[in-house]
Amino acid sequence: MYKININKQATKIAGGFENGLDGIVMVAPGEFIISNYTGILYYLEADGSRQVLLDTQAEKLMTNDISYDNSTKTLYVPAFNKNIVIAYRVR
């Protein structure tokens, strides 16, 4: 993952993710939740460190395009293969 400044210079923020990254939302300045369509949600800190928030690969819940409502701190995660949208409260 890279940050691009106004002069089009790229700075690497984080790397080493599995193939299949799909969605990204900013939840705080410089902090993101990233989805992998195979069923993994990551929390990416401003310093580039990350943690797995959710791993639903065993349940085969594909975490595709995600959306975030900052006013309610709710993350919406569609699971296309199950035809549902799951809402999570982010703290």
Image: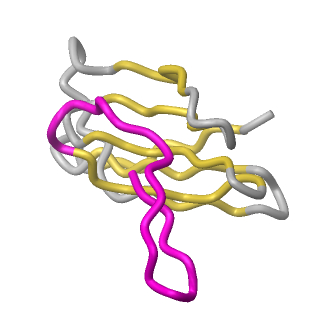
Tell me, yes or no, whether the highlighted magenta stretch contains residue 11. yes
Question: Which quadrant of the view contains residue 15?
Answer: top left
> Residue drawn at (24%, 17%), measured in percent from left and top?
59
| Residue furthest to the bottom | 7
Q: From the viewer's perspective, is residue 35 above or below residue 71?
A: above
59 and 8: which one is in front?
8
| Image-based side of 32 in relation to 58, left or right | right
Magenta region, main secondary structure = loop
6 and 57: which one is in front?
6
- Residue 82, position as x, y percentages in the image: 22, 41
> Residue drawn at (38%, 43%), measured in percent from left and top?
35
Q: Quadrant of the C terminus?
A: top right
> Residue drawn at (54%, 44%), measured in percent from left and top?
33
- Residue 78, position as x, y percentages in the image: 36, 51
| Image-based side of 6 in relation to 52, left or right | right
> Magenta residues?
1-20
65 and 86: which one is in front?
65
> Residue drawn at (48%, 20%), measured in percent from left and top?
52
Question: Which quadrant of the view contains residue 41?
Answer: top left
| Image-based side of 4 in relation to 83, left or right | right
